[in-house]
Each structure stands twice: as C-alpha cells, then as structure tokens.
Image (spheres, helix red, strand yellow):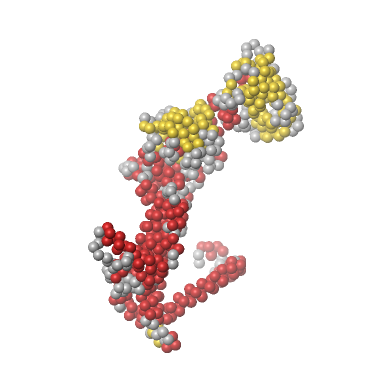
Amino acid sequence: MSLAEEYTGTDGDSRLSQSVAHLRRNRRAYLLIAPAAVFLLAVVGYPILETFRLSLYRSPADSTIETFVGLQHYVEIVNSDIFYRLIWQTGRWVLVGVAGKTLLGLLIAVHLKGDIKGRKFFRTAFLIPWGIPYAISAVVFRWIEHPQFGYLNAVLLKLGVIEQGIGILGNPDIAWLGVVVADIWIGTPFMAIIFLAGLQSIPQDLYEAAAIDGAERWHQFRYITLPQLKSVILMATLLSTIWTFVSFDVIWTMTGGGPISTTATLVIHIYQVGLQNGNLGRGAAYSVIGFLFLLLFAIVYLRVYTRGGDEL
Amino acid sequence: MSKVRLSNVSKVYEDDILAVEGLDLTVEDGEFVVVVGPSGCGKSTTLRMVAGLETVSHGEISIGETVVNDVRPQDRNIAMVFQSYALYPHMSVRENMSFGLRLAGDDADEIQRRVDDAAEMLEISELLDDYPKQLSGGQQQRVALGRAIVRDPDVFLMDEPLSNLDAKLRTQMRTEIQRIQESLGVTTIYVTHDQTEAMTMADRIVILNDGKLQQVAPPEECYDEPNNEFVAGFIGSPSMNFFDVAVTSSNRGAHFESPAGEFTLGIDVPPGEYTFGVRPEDLTAEREGGYIDTIVDVVEPVGSDNYLYLKTTRSTSEVIARVESDFRPEVGDEIELGFDIEDIHLFDADGERMPVTELQMTDSA
C-alpha cells in the first residue's frame, strides 16, 4: 500500500470506484472522443490484429483455405538471406533519405528565416515539390535520370564530367541513390516548413545576446538554434522516418524495386510477396516485423531524446 | 572601461522612418548615464546602435578610441542586459553566465572563479545549477546582470532591465544595479521610460523625444532647469502645470494674463506670448492671497502628500497641486494657488527655456 493510499485509506475496490467516478465526471469528454476512438479501432486496430492473425497462416489468395502454421513464417523469414538484405536496403534508404531531408530542410529553413529578398516567393516555391503527387514526381525523376534523354546526363555530358550517358536506375550499385534523391526532393519541403515554424518561435534577442557574448554565426546555430529546435527536429525526424520507412509509390514508380531487387525495401517486398505473389501469410509476417521495427524505433528514439526530462 | 562617444548619429529605417536624428553625446569613462524618453523616442535604437545590433545611418559611434560603426557586436567588448533578460533557456545559470567566456576560450578555472565571484556579488550562488525557467523574474534579472558582469566589458548597456519586475523588486534592484556599477566602475548606458529610475540612478540623464536630444544634464539640473517645455513636462511626477500667458510690461515687473488668472511678478521678461510652468510641488494652496483662483475637483491622498486636482475659476483648465497631507480641503472649496518666483519656468513660442531674472527691490504681486 502506498503512502497516499494509507492516508486516504483506499484499496483496490475503492480505486475501481474512483475510476468509475472519474468516468462519470468526464462522461462528456469521453463521449465526444468516442466516435474518433471507434473509427481508429476500426481502421487501425482491426487491420493490425488481422495482419498478425494472417501471419500465422499459410494463405494463398483464396482465404477460405487458410492453414494454421504458427510462427513458421517468422522462422523462415529470420533464417532467409533476403531478410537481412532487405534490412540493409531499407536501413540505408531511411537513413540517407531522412538525413538528406533533415539537413536540406534545415539549410533552407535557416536561410528562409533570414532577411532575404523574395522570401515570400521562395517560401511558396519550396512547397511545390510537396504539393505534387509523389508518383508524378517519381516519373519526372525517372525522366531526369534517363540514360539517353535525361536532363542529368545531358548536363553532365555538356560539362564533360562523363563521356557517355549513365543509366542510374539500371545500375544495381547506384539505383537506390537515384531513388533516394527523388525522395529527398519530395520530402524536404515538409521538413523546411516545420523547421521554419520552429525557428520563428526562437526569440530574436537570444541571438542578439549571443552575438554580444561573442558568438559567431556557427556558434549561434550550434548553441542557440539547434538546442532550441531540438524538440521540433525530434518530431519531424520521427515522422519522416516513419513515412520514409513505409513509402512505396516513389520506389515502385521509379524502379519497381529493381534492378535485381536492389532498390526494394521491406514495404516493396511485402507488396511483392503478399499481393503480387499471393502469399498473404508471408507478406503479413513481414508487415508485423516492419511494424515492430517502427514501434521499437519510436520508443527508443523518444526515450533517448527525452532523457533530460524535456517535454516535447 | 571606456568612454563612449556618439557624434551626429542618426538612424533612418528602410521605410524612411527617422528614429534618431543627429545625436551628440559623450559618456565619460565610468559614468552611469540614463537615456530616458517616451515610447518611440529612439532611446532603445540608440542603445542598439551602440551595441552594434542596429547599423548607424549617419554619424559616428566610438568606444574608447575606436570608431565602432563597422565593428560587429561580437568584437565591441560590451555587455547588454535585455528587457526580456534573453537568458538561454536550455543552459543552466552557470552555463548562461559563462557562455561568453567559454566562447572566448578562457581557462576553465578562471571561468569558474569569475562566475562564482559574480554569483556571490549578486547573491545567486545557490542558483548556479538551476535553469532559467526554474527562476523567478527577479532571479532571472540577477542572472542577466551576472552574465554581463563576468565578461568584464568596457561598457554595460541596459535596455529597460527592470520593467518586467514588480514595483518593490524594481526599487530593490535599482539600488543593487547602482551599487554594482559603482563598485565595478564600468561605463554604463541605461535605457528606461521610467523617469524615477532616471532621476535616482543616473550621474547624468539623457532625455530624448522624437529621436532628438532634448537635454543632457545631472538629474537635479533636468528637474530645476529644464531646457525646454518637453523636458519640463517629462521630468517630475505629477507633471508640471502649464498655462499659455501673454506678458506685458508694468512698472512692477511683468504682468501675466492667462486663462488661469492675472498677476504681476517682479521679474524681467520681454513682452510676448509664453508658456508658463510651475510644478505641483511648488504650488502653495491658500484660502486667499494667491495668484490663481481655483475650485477643488478631486483630492487624492497618497499618504505623505495630498494631490489636489483643481479647476481654475476663470477658464476651468486643470491644475495639479501637491500639498502636505494635513491640508485636506473638500471638493468644491475655493483655493488660491501661490508660488515663489524662483520656482516658475517660462518657455518661448518654440518651447525653449526663457531665463527668469528677478527684479531687485520688488516684492511679488
């Protein structure tokens, strides 16, 4: 019995009655959030449970002849080479993509905050990539990187950097970079806007005080901007990591996971195995693994970042 | 420690707003100068130009022997206390105070010693590990001062540092800042809109209005001999009473005719139109025998004194008189206001001070 309970003389029973009383008091609030909660359960909760159930079955596309196989899918996945290759490919896709978007977003935000001419125009212009449907951006980048007719090759040829056109998306070594570039281009505006909003909430007199204290621009960025922006960066990179991890349309449109599956991420593989090959059980098992990865990541990430007791 | 000199300094903002116009000012080494004026008079802009946070449109600012117009704030060796304190929220008090020293690459032991010394001086030693959000306004104010002190700067700049504190704390910090400034002997420019701060703290007061310098003088001089009508009205609380007067010569001195009343004073003033000023505390309230006939409108006791808000019987213009607390008339009472000749102020049509010379051998009225 805790000290508080000793004082108030409460035990398990009255705790229940306290909960009931709490529910009664806040009945209106709970009633109001109930529809949203039910909706969430239906479109998020149920699919998660159903996916987990599905992963325990060998299920061809015809769901009437499911066979329970227990954890067999998981065992096979963990013992397969492809799984580790997928982890590596997904990892570099997320890491490079999120790092690129964060750094570029920060760079743009810091400069858009400054007193530059045409700031309003640039603010709007930088949002455009985000407003274009991802698949269309992906098609544009596929064209830009095209070996014969692509913009990139044309420029590189003109500058004499290369002697003949290179097929970035056809080269198993660098195809993933060709896709990551498109993803960074699409995802950067979101980061820039979030960071810009964060930057604008940092009081100007902190910078002035720092300047008088002798801080150069770099010091100001390092000791004022970054610490002040910490919680914004944390949230933005967390969201970006989740979105990049689950992103499908850019990769699928540009390479379909190829060449020789070098641009395939876990999500692409889930689609291929579960929906293209009709092995729903195996696809569901991959999905559950992906879900657990993200969950674990989010928990660890938030723990590490809020260790100092900072609130988000 | 250094002298600060502003020569013909102006600040024009991009939208052609003239914030400061042709300001000439020399702050002597170790002097405590308070810049005071109403909102928008250019006092903060002036301070920020000295700090290097605003560019100088025209003129020259020098600290010591160096012209600093093109010197960045980082390189001016100044320290500034902001109205908002501008403490770094993510740093502890110790880190806040040592930030500048750490950037300068000072020795860690030396930094610790200086921070500890400053903290002791400000009585915040036990707060060194706290974060700004854990501190009260007064404590944050002390940390902001501490951050300025540890740097051992040539010049302290303070931008309304006390305006976020409550009245009691403000009075306390006022004396504290004076004590610190005196013991360190650092040249200090202090900006405020509060004339009480200006009067109590300054070696000299700099009064600005509309970006123009009105007067630079020790507090008593600003009070006793205001350069112009603006200074006369700005310094002193409640404000000086003003009347428009027409002066004609008479054999007994100058005859004043105004909406407030008519009287002759034994002084030498050329005939013409003037503004006549007299401070509420220089007025004497009599049942009869004064110069200005009034009726009591409101009596405001403030403890030590009573403020009488009166209407002149001639024109119902308002006059304020500050009288002793045991003199407490009823509303509607008739009162005649008197004053000594040495306490009156005269300003010409441009608002500039007119010298008042008393005629010999003459008695007033």
Q: Is residue B246 visible?
A: yes
Seen at 43% across and 29% down, the residue is: B7
Taking the view exactly as shown, the residue that stands out farthest to the top is B361
Q: Quadrant of residue B287?
A: top right
The answer to whether A277 is drawn above or below residue B141 in the figure is: below
Q: Position of residue B178 (x, y in %)?
A: 48, 33
How many marks the image carries: the answer is 0
Q: Residue at x 31, y 69 (%)?
A: A169
Q: In the rendered image, which quarter contains the N terminus of chain B?
A: top left
Query: Relative to A66, is A130 above or below?
Result: above
- Between residue A136 and residue A43, name the one nearer to us: A136
In the rendered image, is residue A198 in sight? no
Position above or below: B298 against B93: above
| Above or below, A98 relative to B156 | below
Q: What residue is shown at x 44% (from left), y 36% (from top)? A: B57
* Residue for point 37% across, 57% down: A104
Give the side of residue A250 with respect to residue B320, left or right: left
Q: Position of residue B254 (x, y in %)?
A: 66, 17
Percent x, y of residue B140: 47, 44
**Residue at the left extreme?**
A163
Q: Position of residue A244 (x, y in %)?
A: 39, 67
Q: Quadrant of residue A27?
A: bottom right
In this view of the protein, which residue sits in the foreground, A132 or A234? A132
Foreground of the two, B130 or A227: A227
Q: Quadrant of the C terminus of chain B?
A: top right
Q: Is residue A12 left or right of residue A162?
A: right
